[in-house]
Amino acid sequence: MPPPRTGNVRKHANGYSARIRIGPKERPSFDLAVRTDDAAEGRAAFLADLASRLRPVAAPDEIKAILEAAGGASTEKGLQQVKDAADAIANGETTKATSAMAPTFATFAADWTKGELRKKYPDHVRAKDSTRDTQVLRDFINPALGTTRIADVTLEDAERVMAKLPPELAPRSRKLVAQCMRKVLSLAVYPGRYLTSNPIPREWMPKIPKSANKAKACLYPAEDAKLLACEAVPVERRLAYGILAREGMRASELGALRWRDVDLEHGRLRLDENKTDDPRAWALSPDVARALAWWKKEAAGTANDLVLRIDLANGAWWLRGDDGWTEGDKTKGPGDLRTAGVTRRELFERTPSRQPIRLHDLRATFVTVSLANGKTEQWVSDRTGHKSSQMIATYARQARTWSELDLGTLGPLDGLLPETRAARPRGKRPAKPAEPPPDWATIGPELEVRKGFEPSYDGFANRCLTTWLPHHFF
C-alpha cells in the first residue's frame, strides 16, 4: 500500500520528495533533505516559490538544477546560497544555474589565499605564502573582476584586467598579475569544479622581453663590514643582513626559521618547508653558527621561537631607505646602508635599466661571492634551493668580475658584529687557524706607490677588513 500523499509532498522509505512544476508539462520529483512532515511541507513550499520566480526567465533545465540543490541543502547556509543563486538568475545577472551557484571570483580567490581550499583539498592545493597574491588580487584583479561569478569568467575578462593595469607597471609585475588570475581559474576547474576548462590558455601569458632584465647590485666586502659594524642599526636587522649574505637562503625562509631548525651543536641548518617544497639542509658557515649561538643566548630563544623576531617583509625599505630621500630630509628614512656610511650610487639608483638594492640581492651577493671563490654550483644550490644550473649561471658574469677585482670573501659575521666581539671572554686570545694568516709582506706592497700608481683606499680597506684584520684581532 503506497504512503499517503500530503499535497505535492510524498513520504517514502528513504525520506521525502516533492513534485514541482518547472515547465508547462514538466513536474519532476525532487528529494528533500528533511526529517519531519512539517519540514517537508516547508521545503516543498520553498521549492515551489523558487520555481514560480524562475519560470519566466530561465530554461527548465536550469530551474531543475536550482531546485535539486535547494531540495538537497541540509543547512540554512546551503539554502541561502541557493536562494542567492535564484536571485542572480531572476535579476538577469546570469542565465545558468551552475554560474549562479558558483562564488564570485573574489570570494573563490580569497578561499585560496586564506588557506580554505588547502584545508578542503590537501592533496591538490599546496600550502604557500600568499602575501604577494593577496596584494595583486586587491590592487589589480578584484576591482575589475571580483564581482563576476567564477563560472562566467572569460578570456575577454582577463584581457580587460590587463588593459587596466598602470602603464608604468614592469613586465614582470604584469606577468605576475596574469599568473595569479590563471592560477585562480585553474583551481576553479579542479578541485572547484566550477569550470570545465581554464579560459586562459598558456599561450596567452605575457612574455618578458630581454630588455626587462635590469642590472642589480650586490654589497662589496667593505660595505658589508660597515653595515654589520654600525651599532646605530638594530642588531636583529644586521644579523638578518649578515646571514642572508653568507648562507643564501630566501628572506621568507629566514623569517620563518625557528630555533628547532638550527643544530648549533653540529653547525647545521634545515629547511623542511620552503617555497619549492623541497626540504634541504646544509652545514652553516662557522662564523654564522657562532653568531647564532650568541644570539640564541642573548634572546633566550627556545625551540619553537623564531630565530629573528622581525618582519622581513620590510627588509628592502630598511636596507636602502626611501628612494626619494635626500640629505637632511627628516620626513623619509635614509635606510641602514646610508646610516652605516655606505653611499655607493649604484646601490640606490632606479632607472629603466637598473633597480636599487633589495633584500633579495643579499642572496645574490652570496651566490656571486661563492662562485667567485671557487664554490661549485651544487654547493651553492644546496643552500639556495635553485633547481637548475641555468638559474645559477645568471650570476656567472658578476662572479667573474668579482674575481678579477680580487674582492675576496665577506668577513666573519661574529667578527664584524661589535656585540659578538664584546661578548667573547677576555684573557686568552682565541687560537689562530691552522692556515697562517697573511702578514704585512703580502699586504705591504699595496701601500707602495710604484710607477706612478697609487692604490685606491677602498681596495686596501677591502683587504684589511676581510683578510688581515679578522685574522689578527678577531
Image (tube, rainbow, N blue to C red):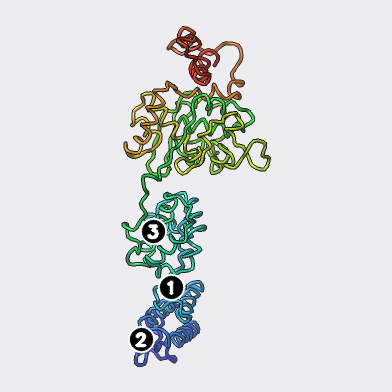
Give the residue number, with chain letter if any, for mark 2.
Answer: 28
Is the residue 203 above or below the residue 425 in the image? below
The residue sitting at 51% across, 63% down in the picture is 143
- CA neighbours of label 1 inside 10 A, class few (<14), some (14 to 19), many (20+): many
Give the residue number, with chain letter if any, for mark 3.
Answer: 182
Contact flag, marks 2 and 3 (Cβ < 8 Å): no
Q: Amino acid at mark 3?
A: Arg
Disc number lying in front (2 or 1): 1
Contact flag, marks 3 and 1 (Cβ < 8 Å): no
The residue sitting at 43% across, 77% down in the picture is 94
Q: Secondary structure at mark 2?
A: loop
Q: Amino acid at mark 2?
A: Pro
Give how far apart the Cα atoms at labels 2 and 3 are: 39 Å
The residue sitting at 38% across, 67% down in the picture is 154
Identify the image quadrant of residue 404: top left
Q: Earlier in the sequence, mark 2 or mark 1?
A: 2
Q: Secondary structure at mark 3?
A: helix
Identify the image quadrant of residue 95: bottom left
Quarter of the rendering occupied by the N terminus: bottom left
**Marker disc for residue 101:** 1
Give how far apart the Cα atoms at labels 2 and 1 are: 21 Å
Disc number lying in front (3 or 1): 3
**Residue 407 location in percent, x, y?**
45, 22
**Marker disc for residue 430:** none
**Residue 141 location in percent, x, y?**
47, 60
> Who is closer to the viewer here, 469 or 34?
469
Give how far apart the Cα atoms at labels 3 and 1 are: 21 Å
Quarter of the rendering occupied by the C terminus: top right
Disc number lying in front (2 or 3): 3
Q: Secondary structure at mark 1?
A: loop
Q: Amino acid at mark 1?
A: Met
